[in-house]
Amino acid sequence: MISRAGQTMLRQARMKIQQRRHSPPVASLSALARLLSSLAILEQKDGKLNHSSLGSITAAQKLGGSITGFLAGSNIKGAAEEAAKVAGIQKVISVENVAYDKVRPPSTDLHPFALNILRDYPKTTLLCLSRT
């Protein structure tokens, strides 16, 4: 015979199991993927990746999920290729524009770009580290 305390524990365990069975599923796999994704804004100068900004990649890796790197400026092909080789980055988005050579994250000048990127490539986390 099971004591009253034992019966209460069994009843509570059954209720928890039933609640888990009836929890609503994620609407779609893309929604789940979005829950586990980060956009890391990286710095570059003269076509070379600023390695101090790679801390945002480290932070994104600790969060888990896919990581997209973002670079803006002129002559960024070399920096984009270097960023693509960084462990953990699945995709690199680069914007070639001289106007962004002097802009350093976190800056309100990059804000419109970040919003457009987040609209086109939905992410749940925006990471930006700066050397200053």
Image (cartoon, rainbow, N blue to C red):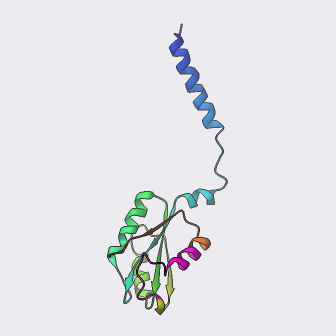
Is 112 contained in the magenta span? yes
Residue 64 or residue 87, whichever sits in front: 64
Magenta-tinted stretch: 100-117
Does residue 17 sit above or below 77 in this rendering?
above
Q: Which residue is drawn at 43% across and 87% down?
A: 76
Residue 78 location, quadrant: bottom left
65 sits to left or right of 34: left
Q: Which residue is at the far front? A: 108
Does residue 57 sit above or below 16 in this rendering?
below
Q: Residue at x 51, y 14 (%)?
A: 5
- Image spot of residue 92 (x, y percent): 48, 76
Is 23 contained in the magenta span? no
* Quadrant (top left/top right/bottom left/bottom right) for the C terminus: bottom left
- Image spot of residue 108 (x, y percent): 48, 78
- Image spot of residue 24 (x, y percent): 66, 44
Does residue 60 sit above or below 45 in this rendering?
above
Residue 121 or residue 126, whichever sits in front: 126
14 sits to left or right of 93: right
Does residue 91 sit above or below 74 in this rendering?
above
* Quadrant (top left/top right/bottom left/bottom right) for the N terminus: top right
